[in-house]
Amino acid sequence: RQLTNPLLADRLVKALGPRVALFAPLLHNTVSPTMLHASDKVNVIPSEIELGLDGRLLPGFQPEDMTRELRALLGDDFDLEIVLFDPGPAAPDMGLFDTLGAVLRELDPEGVAVPLVLTGVTDARFFSLLGIQTYGFTPLKLPEDFNFIRTVHAADERVPVEALEFGTQAIFKAMQLFRSGG
C-alpha cells in the first residue's frame, strides 16, 4: 500500500529507468481513452463528444477515487459516468501459493513463483464475486531472447510452443497435487 504514495511511487518510477513502462501501471491508477464518438457525418460539427475511458484501479481503490483523480486533472467542465465496475477480491487468500511455487521449482529448479498484480483484468473477477479464490498460475518458460511484454495483446501475440508445453506440464502436476490433497 505504501507504493500508492505518490512521492514513493514517483521515486521508484524514476529509479526503474527504461523498465518503467512495465511497472508504472502497477503503482498508479491508470486510464486509457479507448472509444470516441462525435458526429455521424463528416461535415457536421457535433454538439457533444463522448469519450470512452478504460480505467484500471489498484487494489483498495474505488471508482470514486478515479473520478476524483480525473476531475483534479481535467476540471469539472464535463459529465462523467461510471458505466461498469467489477470489484476485485477484498483480500486474496494465498494459501496455495507455496504449493504452486513447489510445482514450479520441481520442473525448473531456477524458477521462482512471484505474486503479481496485473495491470489488466481477467475473468477471475467473476469468481471473486462468488467468494472463489483464483490464482493466475500461468507458468511459461520463455527463451531469453523472447520479448513477452511486447507481444501481449499485440497483433502478433504469441508464445513459443515449448513455453506452452512447460506450462501445461506444470498445471497438470498442480492438479495432481490438489487431487491427492498434497
Image (spheres, rainbow, N blue to C red):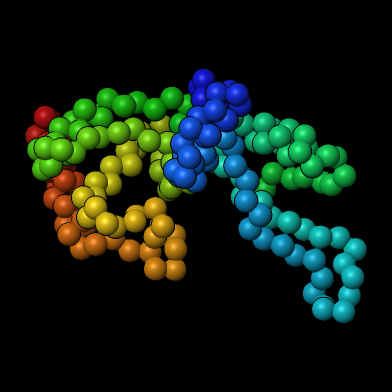
Left or right: 172 in relation to 121: left
- Of residues 42 and 63, which is closer to you in this image? 42
Q: Position of residue 154 (x, y in %)?
A: 44, 63
Going 81% across and 60% down the picture, which residue do you hit? Answer: 49
Report x, y in % for residue 158.
Answer: 33, 63
Instruction: Mark yes or no: residue 7 visible.
Output: yes
Name the quarter where the C terminus is drawn: top left
| 137 sits left or right of 57 in the view | left
Q: Quadrant of residue 67?
A: top right
Residue visible at 51% across and 25% down in the picture: 3
Q: Nearer the viewer, residue 137 or 161?
A: 161
> Who's the residue at 85% across and 40% down the image?
76
The image shows residue 62 at horizontal and vertical percentages of 62, 31
In the foreground, 159 or 103: 159
Q: Residue at x 90, y 63 (%)?
A: 47
**Is residue 119 at least partly visible in the picture?**
no
